[in-house]
Image (spheres, rainbow, N blue to C red):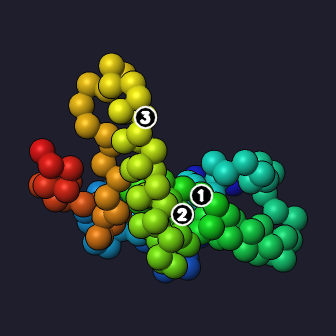
């Protein structure tokens, strides 16, 4: 499919293409981010799906993986499922103990404190730059 044909089809369907600009409310950055995560997931079919049912089944499996196995950096490497069901605080507390014990055993390996293991109250897709600086303590 040529790009011009694709754009024409979008316009025929009443869809305006987006360039995913950060902090622009009418871009769908959530969908773009999800599509990228899906396409880079091992097992994503390079040649596409044979049927709609096959695509739906793959997406269902992806959703389970994304919410219950994939550890998110913005959530301090816990899963969204762990965050929502309340397990995240305990997991991060255990990690904190492990890091503190490792620092006590080998202080020469540490140039500063242990990593930030506090659970963020809010996670943004495109935070304003001054919000990021305040959240990180800069």
| x and y, in percent, of residue 132 in the image | 20, 54
**Which numbered disc, 2 or 3, marks the residue closer to the eye?**
3
Categorize mark 2 by other alpha carbons within 10 Å: few (<14), some (14-19), many (20+): many
Q: CA distance from mark 2 to mark 3?
A: 24 Å
Q: Which numbered disc flags the more N-terminal residue, 1 or 3?
A: 1
Q: Which numbered disc flags the more N-terminal residue, 2 or 3?
A: 2
Quadrant position of the C terminus in the picture: top left
Residue position for label 1 = 70
| x and y, in percent, of residue 64 in the image | 68, 70
Q: CA distance from mark 1 to mark 2?
A: 6 Å
Say if residue 8 shows up in the picture.
no
- SS at mark 2? loop
Categorize mark 3 by other alpha carbons within 10 Å: few (<14), some (14-19), many (20+): some
| x and y, in percent, of residue 77 in the image | 48, 54
- In depth, the one of 106 and 121 nearer the eye is 106
Q: CA distance from mark 1 to mark 3?
A: 26 Å
- 55 with respect to 20 (left or right): right
Q: Residue at x 63, y 48 (%)?
A: 40
**Which disc is residue 110 wearing?**
none
- 51 with respect to 71 (left or right): right
- In depth, the one of 78 and 124 nearer the eye is 78
**Residue 126 sits above or below residue 53 on the image:** above
Quadrant position of the N terminus in the picture: bottom right
- In depth, the one of 38 and 7 nearer the eye is 38
Residue position for label 2 = 79
**Which numbered disc, 1 or 3, marks the residue closer to the eye?**
3
- SS at mark 1? loop
Categorize mark 1 by other alpha carbons within 10 Å: few (<14), some (14-19), many (20+): some
Residue position for label 3 = 102
Q: Residue at x 19, y 56 (%)?
A: 135
């Amino acid at each position: 499919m040529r790009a011009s044909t694709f754009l024409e089809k979008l316009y025929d369907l009443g869809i305006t293409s987006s360039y995913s600009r950060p902090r622009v409310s009418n871009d769908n950055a959530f969908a773009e981010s999800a599509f990228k995560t899906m396409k880079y997931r091992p097992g994503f079919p390079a040649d596409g799906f044979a049927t709609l049912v096959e695509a739906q089944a793959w997406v269902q499996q992806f959703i389970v993986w994304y919410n219950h196995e994939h550890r998110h950096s913005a959530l301090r490497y816990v899963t969204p499922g762990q965050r929502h069901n309340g397990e995240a605080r305990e997991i991060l507390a255990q990690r904190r103990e492990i890091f503190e014990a490792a620092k006590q055993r080998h202080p020469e390996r540490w140039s500063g404190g242990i990593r930030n293991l506090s659970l963020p109250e809010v996670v943004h897709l495109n935070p304003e730059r001054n919000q990021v600086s305040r959240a990180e303590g800069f």
